[in-house]
Image (cartoon, rainbow, N blue to C red):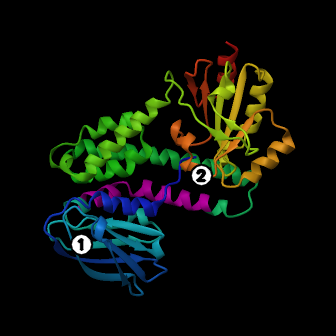
Amino acid sequence: MRRIYSYCFYIFLFIIIFSSCKNNSNTYHIEGKIKNLTASELYVVTGAQDSLKVDTIFSNKEGRFSFKIQSDSLSPVIIYLEKGKIWMTVWPEDKHKITLSGDAVYPELILVKGGGINDLLSKFKEENYDIIKERRDLIDRKSALEKIDTSTVDMDNKHQYSSKILNLNYTLKNKAENFIVANPEAFASVVLFHDYLMAWGEPQEALKYLGYIKGKATETQLYKDVLRDLNDMVMKIERASVGSKAPDFSVLAINEKDTINLDTFKDRYLLLSFTASWCEFCCDDYKELAQIRKEIGKNQLGILVIALDRDKMIWKKLVEKEKLDWKYSVDTLEWLSPIADLYNIGEIPANVLIDKNRIVVGRDLPVDSLIYMLKK
């Protein structure tokens, strides 16, 4: 299950990224028509980091709205709709009139036209309309299932939806890669790289496509920040990759008394298993760990489960009831967990196998492979 990010943080960070790209301020006329709006208020965020400005405008019953703004070149304007639940990014450029059109039900397909950047990004959406629409429909269906009582059928459907969404993510990533190759000097390529390859691609592979971008696009602040973040991601991956020295850690056991670190498992192999009670793909973790423990004794293998959960009681009750024969730690910071960051855990379930010399010898291995490797 992929990490869930704070979208509001992303948007304001996006504005901060471009706060240093200041040219002469220009006035732009923006108008739009968005179908199926349930709230007439729209919030427009403009300005730089130290002078963010939020304006409230209103749409009519047909979803039409119109306003003027002052903005610097390459400084994005963020328009929030549906009381902040969805938003769109507008790139004012060359004093063009900017128009928005689409459906609030499909926010990813709202088109922004006017200026080279907006037109290229809208062209990408139009060329991939069916893929983007299908992805949104699947996300909505999966979300609807999660709001009702789960059954075996519902869980199977959610797994199917998740698998299809993941496939569509990679399809869109590939489409973005093709766009970048075809438009290497376009700033729109930097935006698509940020939105698709940074979110869904492997950092080492993404660096290859970042290398296609050239010209003035590489002089923008977004490109520089993307390059910096990508290099940081590669360094993080290498820090806990197979063959590297396992970074030490210190976590509190589930009894909230004992401290657990690498020395706790001295002269033994260690299996770090990352999970969470809300993770629909983690349901078989307990059975798999029980199978591993049955095959490999505690004198040879230490097991530490890191639960990324806000509610510790869920795991305390489970450990007491099942009398589990391995160590547990619950990190209520969830995805902000230091140990998850230390071992570059970007999705769960996940496991890391560390040998007696504190070398990472395996990551995300299936049960059979883990048992075979340990026995060997």
Circles 2 and 1, Cβ within 8 Å, touching? The answer is no
The dominant secondary structure in magenta is helix
Q: Earlier in the sequence, mark 2 or mark 1?
A: 1
Whole-percent x and y of residue 305? 69, 38
Q: SS of the residue at dot 2?
A: loop
* Residue 239 rendering spot, x and y as whole percentages: 46, 30
Quarter of the image for residue 68 reads bottom left
Closer mark to the observer between disc 2 and disc 1: 2
**Which amino acid, mark 1?**
Ile
| 230 horizontally vs 239: left or right | left
Image position, residue 161 (x, y; %): 59, 51
Q: Is residue 36 magenta?
A: no
In front of the other: 166 or 72: 72
- Magenta part of the protein: which range? 119-143
Residue type of the residue flagged with mark 2:
Leu
Where residue 219 sits: x, y (%)? Answer: 18, 48
Question: Which image quarter: residue 319?
Answer: top right
Q: Quadrant location of residue 340? A: top right
Residue 317's label in the rendered image is none
Residue 333 is tagged as: 2
Left or right: where 57 falls relative to 345: left
Residue 374 vs 81, above or below: the answer is above
Q: In percent of the image, x 38 and y 33: which residue is there?
A: 204
Pick the quarter of the image with the C terminus: top right
